[in-house]
Image (tube, rainbow, N blue to C red):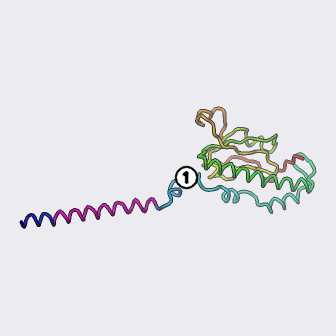
């Protein structure tokens, strides 16, 4: 009888220890799920955060553009800049930048990893720097926010999410990388002016 009672007490102690160990194992998993997963992964922290602030830190402000345009009389072709053209250039800069950021945010929501550059017209300031249909990864844009258009005043370059059916590796012969992984590309200076009016 003593052995049976001792066995029962020992069984209860073992059960209590098992329950205690089980509870301890559940707590770290609960704490891990409470932490935001988005900030633990390098890819997710790049893809999920809006690029707006990061890009704004590498592009000239509206006031800087306004002051620069006020000091300029002509574009790279020697065409005279009027107040209307200056205002148009500033508005196009803001519109183009917002369009690029919106395209990246939409691509982030869709899980897009690669983007390509297209042009809405001839852009002599970009033609020696950014080939049409050349591509850049989302990670490279995160690392080098300066690679997000517009590149200069009057820039006609725009960025588009790559959503082809085949892998980007399959099209690597058709598209050219803007730059290698370790070097910032040579881009036009933002102060180059191309007026379209």
The residue under the point 33% across, 63% down is 24
State the residue lying farthest toward the front. Answer: 1
Horizontally, residue 122 falls left or right of residue 177, namely right
- Give residue 121's position: percent from left, percent from top: 81, 40
Residue 128, image x, y percentages: 76, 41
Give the residue pinned by disc 1. 44
- Residue in front for this viewpoint, 167 or 10: 10
Task: State yes or no: residue 27 in magenta.
Answer: yes
In the image, farthest residue toward the left: 1
SS type, badge 1: helix
Residue 47 location in percent, x, y? 59, 51
What is the tally of numbered marks visible in this picture? 1
**Direction from residue 56 to residue 46 in the image, left or right:** left
Residue for point 11% across, 66% down: 6
Q: From the image, which quarter does the N terminus lie in?
A: bottom left
Q: Does the magenta portion include 130?
A: no
- The vertical placement of 184 against 14, above or below, is above
At 73% from the left and 41% from the top, the residue drawn is: 118
Image vertical order of residue 109 relative to residue 132, above or below? below
Tell me where residue 186 appears, x and y as whole percent: 71, 47
Which image quadrant is residue 59 in? bottom right
Q: Residues within 10 Å of mark 1 (few under 14, many from 20)?
A: some
Examine the residues drawn in magenta and state their main secondary structure.
helix
Picture quadrant where residue 31 is located: bottom left
For the point 66% across and 49% down, the residue is: 104
* Extent of the magenta region: 9-33
Of residues 148 and 32, the one nearer the viewer is 32
Vertical placement of residue 140 versus 34, above or below = above
């Amino acid at each position: 009888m003593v052995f049976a009672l001792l066995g029962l007490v020992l069984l209860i102690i073992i059960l209590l220890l098992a329950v205690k160990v089980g509870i301890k194992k559940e707590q770290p998993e609960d704490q891990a799920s409470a932490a935001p997963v988005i900030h633990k992964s390098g890819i997710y922290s790049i893809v999920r955060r809006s690029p707006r602030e990061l890009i704004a830190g590498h592009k000239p402000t509206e006031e800087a553009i306004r002051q620069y345009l006020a000091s300029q009389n002509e574009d790279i072709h020697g065409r005279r800049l009027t107040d209307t053209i200056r205002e148009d250039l500033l508005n196009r800069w803001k519109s183009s930048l917002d369009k690029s950021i919106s395209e990246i945010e939409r691509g982030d929501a869709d899980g897009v990893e690669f983007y390509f550059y297209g042009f809405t017209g001839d852009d002599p300031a970009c033609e020696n720097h950014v080939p049409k249909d050349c591509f850049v990864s989302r990670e490279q844009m995160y690392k080098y926010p300066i690679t997000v258009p517009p590149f200069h005043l009057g820039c006609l370059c725009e960025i588009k999410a790559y959503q082809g059916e085949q892998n980007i590796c399959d099209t690597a012969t058709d598209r050219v990388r803007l730059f290698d992984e370790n070097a910032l590309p040579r881009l036009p200076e933002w102060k180059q002016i191309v007026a379209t009016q």
